[in-house]
Image (tube, grey):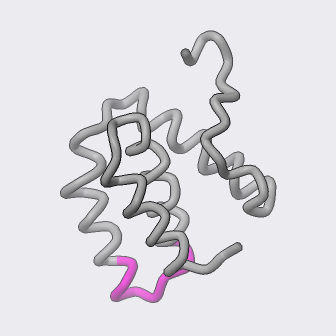
Amino acid sequence: AGDAKAMEMVGLQYGRLNKLHLEMSYMWLSLAMENANPRHKAEINKYLDEHVIPKLGDFDIYRAEKKLRRCKESNYTDCADTGLLTSFER
């Protein structure tokens, strides 16, 4: 919990998968940026801007940010893509 490099590695792995997993990539890379040093933060942000965000729509980003908040609020214990979205979001 809170290890920027580990979060980045998870985010990059999700980023290599299909669009559904790009939301998780966005979440983990965003979390990694919060705990990274400034140089590394810029590298992660560049990757997000070039490889993840362009493939996501506004609603995808909304869902990713919702997952990010849930993960942080649970102190990194509820970070899996459990599919616990409301019927409105499906």
Q: Is residue 29 magenta?
A: no
Segment colored magenta: 34-41
Question: What x and y, as percent, mark residue 58?
Answer: 36, 31
On the rendered image, what quadrant is the N terminus found in? Answer: bottom right
Main secondary structure type of the part rendered in magenta: helix
The residue positioned 39% from the left and 78% from the top of the image is: 41
Question: What x and y, as percent, mark residue 38?
Answer: 40, 86
The image shows residue 52, relative to residue 8, as above or below, that is above
- Is residue 84 shown left or right of residue 90? right
The residue positioned 25% from the left and 67% from the top of the image is: 46
On the rendered image, what quadrant is the C terminus found in? Answer: top right
Question: What x and y, as percent, mark residue 28?
Answer: 51, 60
- Is residue 36 shown left or right of residue 82? left
- Is residue 59 shown left or right of residue 46? right
Determine which quarter of the picture holds residue 23: top left
Determine which quarter of the picture holds residue 81: top right
